[in-house]
Every structure is written in structure tokens, then in C-alpha cells.
Amino acid sequence: MNAFRGKVAVHAITWGDNHLQAIEEASRIGYRAIEPWPHFALQYEHNIGEFKELLAKFSLELTALYGGVPGDSRFADPSKRPDIVDYNVRLSRILKQCGAGHVVLGPGPRKGPATLEELKVAAATIAETAERTLELGIKACLHPHLWTEVQDENEVDAIMELCNSDAVFFAPDTAQLTGAGMNPAELIRRYKERVAYVHLKDVTKDGAVAADFPLMEGNDVPVFCELGLGKIDFDPIIEALNEIHYDGWLTVEIDRSTSTPYRSLEICRDFVEQRLGIPVRG
């Protein structure tokens, strides 16, 4: 497999609301870039200098912020459009001032399969949001997600087709796509001109039990797990990214640790470096 052209980052979600711990430990593990929680970044909305100093203190670069819909809003609700646009513009201003380039458009909660009319409304909201963020130099990237209004392949395809390809980009998540029955490598190739940001994430094997996770505390088997402990074959995904000449961020993510956030992201780091042959440290 050819060497990956992009750079590796880490998502802070595993640490929950322990934002400062996330930054310190991510740096100590060896990650050099991070996607923090948006509500943490918004605390510095009017004091960007302090936010930049905090990141610099731990030698971390800001990669993106997870935007999309605030609260329980939905792209398919036209009454929420002004709030959604405003929310993502606010995040984009932070990103611009920190030298980052992507806002991730996470959809709202799922209420069953989307109708064509809902998809048209959602696409209009996404397109308007993306056009506004692009004015700031920030690429808005559709992020399909399980249990949301943009989950299934037909929904992804419809949104991507209905939206302006010059403004709406694609942020595939390997676990979310796999969990919804899609092939991440195929989607990456399908939207090769629009892939702008990637979440690298594993999904637990079918029929997994607690014993499959030697460090896990308790018996609550997670939906998502540390890289290499799940069912995803990452080689074809990296090959697809190389094939489309992707040289952007590959952001390692695990929603919930089976032990501690530090240990989980250390396991993920080792998998990326040793199994995928992609440097994380330095």
C-alpha cells in the first residue's frame, strides 16, 4: 500500500466535557492536531488569542469543529435554517482565526427514512450554510451519521446531488458509513472531488462480547471501539484515499473508551502507526 499523503489528528469526544484533559493527554500521546468539542471552542469565541495560546502550549493544531445542527434541530426543518446557518458561521469564524479549514455538518435526529421533500429542504439548508462558511474560506462537509436524518446511502446520495458541488464537501466517517451498510472506500471514490475531511473510526464486530475487549471495564459492549478491535478493514479505505490523492486530515475517533481515553487513543495511535504505517508523532 502506498504511503498516505495526509496528516493524522484526534477527536476529543472520548474525553467528554473534560476539555483541558483532552488537550493535555492528546498531546502527551503524540497527536499533533485535534478536533475539539464545538461548545468548548465557543467559550473562546470572543477571546481567540487565549484559545490559540492554549493549543500552542500543547503543540496542537486545530483541524475542524463539529457543527451542523445545534441542539435537536434538523436540516429538514425550514424554520431552523437561520439558526443553523448562524451557528456554523460562528464556528467558521473561530476556525478561520485559528487557521483551520473545515466545519463538519452533523445532521439532526432521525425520525425514520427521509422523504424526498425533507431531503430537498435539508439540501437547501446545507447549501446555504456551506455558501456562507465558504465566504470565510471554510469548507462545510456533510457528515452522514447513524441515527440521524442523513444516515442511509440513498439519503447521502440525494443530499450530495441536490447540493452545489462547489460549496458542499464530504466528510466520510468509516464507522458511520459501515454501520449504515455502506462501503466507505466506494463512497470515497464516488465523491472523490468532494472528500475534504475524514473520521477514522472502527465499529464493533457483530456478536462481540465483553471478553473481546481485554481492557474494558464492565460488560457494556460499545457500538464503536478502538481502531483494530472492530470489523473494519482499513486497507481498502486508505487505498481509496491515496487513489483520489487525498492529502487532508485523517481524524482518529472513538466515542467511548473501553478503559480510559488516554489508553484508547494510545491503542488507536499504535494501530495507525504500526498497522497502517502512517506516522502520528512528529
Image (cartoon, rainbow, N blue to C red):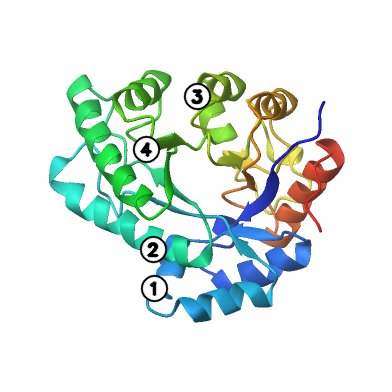
Q: Which amino acid does label 1 sit on?
A: Glu
Name the N-terminal-most of marks 1 and 2.
1
Name the N-terminal-most of marks 3 and 4.
4
Q: Which amino acid does label 3 sit on?
A: Tyr
Q: Which amino acid does label 4 sit on?
A: Ala
Q: Nearer the viewer, mark 1 or mark 2?
A: 2
> Is residue 116 left or right of 196 when viewed as pictured?
left
Where in the figure is residue 145, as x and y percent of width and height? 44, 36
Where in the figure is residue 157, as x and y percent of width and height? 39, 21
Q: Is residue 23 above or below residue 106?
A: below
Name the N-terminal-most of marks 1 and 3.
1
Q: Residue 269 carries which label?
A: none
Label 1 environment density (alpha carbons within 10 Å; few <14, some 14–19, many ≥20)? some
**Res. 255 in view:** yes
Name the N-terminal-most of marks 4 and 1.
1
Label 4 environment density (alpha carbons within 10 Å; few <14, some 14–19, many ≥20)? many
Image quadrant where one finds the C terminus: bottom right
Q: Which residue is drawn at 62% across and 47% down?
A: 251
Q: Quadrant of residue 261?
A: bottom right
User: According to the image, label 1 marks what residue?
Assistant: 45
Q: Do the residues labelled 3 and 4 touch (CB within 8 Å)?
A: no
Instruction: Find numbered disc 4 in the image and state the secondary structure of the residue it sits on.
Output: loop
Instruction: Find numbered disc 3 in the image and state the secondary structure of the residue it sits on.
Output: loop
Label 3 environment density (alpha carbons within 10 Å; few <14, some 14–19, many ≥20)? some
User: According to the image, label 3 marks what residue?
Assistant: 191
Q: Which residue is drawn at 71% across and 54% down?
A: 265
Instruction: Find numbered disc 2 in the image and state the secondary structure of the residue it sits on.
Output: helix
User: According to the image, label 4 marks what residue?
Assistant: 167
Name the N-terminal-most of marks 4 and 2.
2
